[in-house]
Amino acid sequence: MSGVAWAVTDSWTMTRRGLAHWARQPVQVVVGLAFPVMMLVMFGYFLGGGMAVPGGGGYTAYLVPGMLALTMAFGLEATMIAVTRDLGKGVIDRFRSMPMASSAVLVGRSVLDMLQSALSLLVMIGVGLAMGWRWHGGPGGAAAAVGLLLLLRFAMLWIGIYLGLVAGRPEMVQAVQILVWPVGFLSNVFVSAESMPGWLGAVAEWNPMSATASAVRELFANPRWTGDSWAAGHAEVLALVWPVVLLVVFFPLAVRRYRGLGR
């Protein structure tokens, strides 16, 4: 086979390995899907009654697009755990010693995580519809919104791969989680950045999750807060630029770190 066909075949083999793990350990998949659903239900029903939304819209219509963005971003934790688990068990070292394409492990990991993210996105949209959320734009806008969400997840995926390769052990993931959660909540996912103190609101407006959440709300024609800053007025641009910048930085870092394992 040619080099490309060889790499594609080996990458698909790595993806099938992950799918086989799903079949043997469905509880992990269910828990991964249930956690963001629980957060959506909790914030939507427990806190939603006390939230005011511009234009008189319901808080659920504001919350669901933000939670979709947050779910895509928080997926990097699952990527980190999977990578560190394989590293800790020596699985990646064994794969590297086999006659297979060197890119297959990372490509297979990325394909598997994107499949899981698409499934999670589908479940979250279904739960949102059950809660009364609706999008009011056309099918083109909805498709573009889903594309931006998956683009954010793809960028976060490579951050997770790099951090997992650096951490090396599942125990180190907890240290990263301490940083991931504040960054996730320091956004406009739940409330407007304008409601935060000045400097904190500015940080939240430039958060990649805020850009994606605002752009998705606009494409879904859902209510959203608007500000006077450049970031608030150009959310769709930032929703494209931020993931590309993150990919430019972390994709080569992840590849270089992977190639340097064992040296």
Image (tube, grey):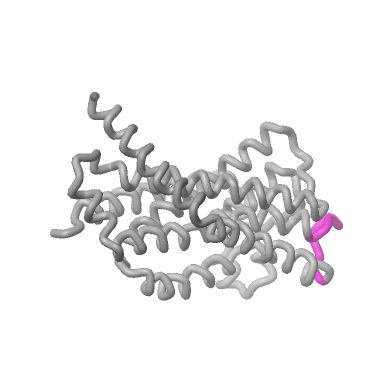
Magenta-colored stretch includes residue 58: yes
Magenta-colored stretch includes residue 57: yes
State whether residue 193 is above or below residue 214. below
- Tell which of 127 and 25 is nearer to you: 25
Q: How many marks?
A: 0
Q: Is residue 163 visible?
A: no
State whether residue 85 is above or below residue 157. below
Judged from this view, the residue extending furthest toward the right is: 56
202 vs 257, left or right, is: right
Residue at the (54%, 45%) spot, across then down: 150
- Tell which of 8 and 147 is nearer to you: 8
Span shown in magenta: 50-59
Residue 53 location in percent, x, y?
Answer: 80, 61
Residue at the (23%, 24%) spot, across then down: 2
Residue 29 location in percent, x, y?
Answer: 55, 56
Residue at the (47%, 60%) spot, across then down: 78
Residue 77 location in percent, x, y?
Answer: 46, 62
The image quarter containing residue 227 is: bottom right
Residue 213 location in percent, x, y?
Answer: 62, 53
Q: Is residue 220 visible?
A: yes
- Please identify the quadrant where the N terminus is shown: top left
- Please identify the quadrant where the C terminus is shown: bottom left
Residue at the (47%, 75%) spot, across then down: 178
Judged from this view, the residue extending furthest toward the left is: 263
State whether residue 44 is above or below residue 239. below
- Tell which of 204 and 27 is nearer to you: 27
Judged from this view, the residue extending furthest toward the front is: 24
The image quarter containing residue 26 is: bottom right
151 vs 10, left or right, is: right
Judged from this view, the residue extending furthest toward the top is: 1
